[in-house]
Amino acid sequence: MAQETYNIEGMTCASCVKAVERSVGKLDGIQELSVNLATEKMLVSYDDRVVSEARIVDTVEDTGYKASLQTAVVEGPTQAERHAIHIKDLWHRFVWSAIFTLPLLYISMGSMVGLPLPSVIDPVAHTIAYALTQLVLTLPVMYLGRSFYKTGFKALFKGHPNMDSLIAIGTSAAILQGIVMTILLASGQVMVHGGHPELYFESAAVILTLITLGKYLEAFSKGKTSEAIKKLIDLAPKTARVIRNDQEITIAIEDVVANDVVVVRPGDKIPVDGEIIEGYSSVDESMITGESMPVEKTVGGEVVGASMNKNGSFRFKATKVGQDTTLAQIIKLVEDAQGSKAPIAKLADEISGIFVPIVMGLAVLAGLLWFFLGQESWIFALSITIAVLVIACPCALGLATPTAIMVGTGKGAENGVLIKSGDALEEAQKVQTIVFDKTGTITEGKPVVTDSIPFNEIEESDLLWLAASAESNSEHPLGEAIVEEASNRQITLDKTEGFQAFPGHGIQVSVAGHTVLLGNQKLMTTKDIDLLDAQVQSDQLASEGKAPMFVAADGQLIGLIAVADTVKKSSIAAIEKLHHMGIEVTMITGDNKGTADAIAKQVGIDRVLSEVLPEDKANEVKKLQNEGRHVAMVGDGINDAPALAQANVGIAIGSGTDVAIESADIVLMRSDLMDVPTAIELSRATIKNIKENLFWAFAYNIVGIPVAMGILYLFGGPLLNPMLAGAAMSLSSVSVLLNALRLKGFKPKA
């Protein structure tokens, strides 16, 4: 069995995805297949004894798309560059199309509303000039929109018509009718006595111009391709110091092998996973675990590649290298989760494969019936056929989704919510369960002093003075929190002497002639310090999710200082609002159960998943999905990236790591949890707007097609005038745009 990822070019909608999956899925030996429209990738598991890579590529290309085996994890900035060029190209096409379409509309429809026309192209006096002028103005618009014809007809001929196919057929029919009428006018076979000749040039130009605008809005709203994988790879150092032949040498990280002895100095990134065999230090693992507090590491302790050594030097034996490291596993999890995401099937794209042949069939049927049964001329029958295709051409259908998404994402940005794509907007409104990471998401992600309790008649300010002075030269985050608290209270610190660290226990130092001990219960017991009743208070603080530290001076306990990662002010309100919206709230963390339960109790969490390893967070999200839940994940750390990608909607805290932000579908720019319910409210409002747009787009077709077929004319009513057909299509687009603009009034509910 083999598993490969292929880059697919040329897909524009859900019907394209279906076409690729259908074609490749028919090959013998294909076990699993997933085509992702958002990432333009295809993940294939297959029996390489039965089917080859070349056969898979050829099959995709036979379907009408380009395929290439992905040889690198990331495509780099080239992909983003191509996307930017594509958006710019669409904008230029729209602007130039509009430049030719506006005068065309003036010439073709201006006189109908009383606007004067130049005498040289008066439709009555100079019919040929009138027709040729419109043709000349239409041809550049056709050229600018040539991609619609290329893609649309190719898809049609391959047997899987898409939205571009309907655009290509409708506008081609309109232009063909205009050219035929121009030829007949020039040859004298058709005479116009008052009024206007039956030309459809302006309808074709308007359709192409408006659909180009829709394509631009759609491309613009899609946003940049995620660079999460590249950012993950960049976390690992490029080199490592190892001991070989009793000498310390620097080698490329790829050359590190299992059982190598690796040397780590203060400030170094740890290159691979391993076990410490000499020395001690505190290591900041927040880039991997998302937890803010550095972890004390002594002999026998395990270290993780890409984490940062804070202070102290040590040596460790490499246990996991290359693709076996924790970082490499996270990269693979993110890659797999992103590749397995099913693309969002837009209603307009889903029905396009059925809509196109139905419209074509109705158009031909109507023309034949009028010609043979209605005894009308072939020009009349052709006009009926083309009128059906023209009025059915999906201007509004093409604009319904991207315009609403554009306005919705704009409103999101105004409210501090960066929504990366229309897919994210559509998925967010389905969310039933939201999983919050604890550290940096529900909590501030930075330890602060929460309690300072003096004993033995010492003043609280003196307690902080001694403790902060003792920690003034420490790089430990708990010590830094104490120093910061003293600074906030404007307490002047004294110089220290005889600093001595007890790894995993605490410190001893001399401050202003006092011997100060600061650390945990083990340190106090070792130094024979009587803890009095402080143990009870220490246990109480620990039960509240705080880290208590004992402070002693000159052999006597003088106080307790508790440090904790505090809950954000917005957490309680945000979770309460989510409950009102009928959404279950879950918290996931690597912390112990006691700390996790204490935080959950403060904010009103429904379900707690504690002591979850970094690589298991995505699995926990998957378990919730297996319960039939539509899951959103909110996080900020690198360890959250796989879970963000696995979730139906990934929501990253803006102050979090770049990788979490890149892996997510939605980013909270203000790092305010109240923006989570705002994102869901906005999603619900936008999808409702899209459904309204689609209703009106289809309503025009449902009403317009029978009228174009001549049903009313059959019963003595009017025949659909070509001008009115073009106006109806323009009106449908305008109504959709105006409805989308109503989203500008969106405001989050209190």
Image: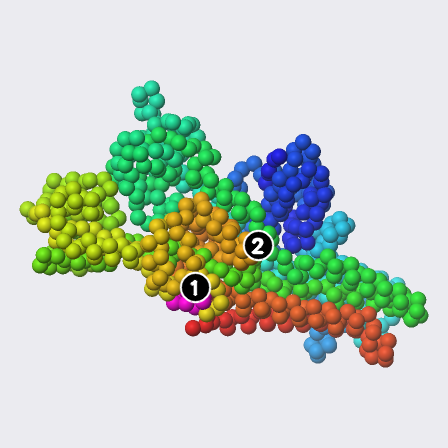
**Which quadrant of the figure has residue 496?**
top left
Residue projecting furthest to the left: 513
Residue at the spot x=50%, y=41% of the render?
332
Find the distance from the CA under tag 2 to the CA under tag 1.
Answer: 29 Å
Q: Residue at x 75, y 48 (%)?
A: 158
Report the residue at 6% width, 46% height from top. 513
Chief secondary structure of the magenta portion: helix
> Horizontally, is 536 left or right of 692 in the view?
left
Residue marked by disc 2: 87
Q: Is residue 447 left or right of residue 647?
A: left
Q: Amino acid at mark 2?
A: Ile
Q: Is residue 236 left or right of residue 478?
A: right
Name the amino acid, label 1: Asp
Magenta region, residue range = 573-579
* Label 2 or label 1, whichever comes before in sequence order: 2
Indicate the secondary structure of the residue bearing disc 2. Answer: helix
Residue 209 shows in the view = no
Instruction: Tell me if residue 278 comes above or below residue 459 in the rendering.
Output: above
234, 128: nearer the viewer: 234
Residue 21 image position (x, y, % from top left): 67, 47
Q: Is residue 191 above or below residue 659?
A: below
Q: Which residue is mark 1?
A: 675
Q: Position of residue 345 (x, y in %)?
A: 63, 57
Number of residues whose C-alpha sits closer than 10 Å to that of mark 1, classed few (under 14), some (14–19) or many (20 or more):
many
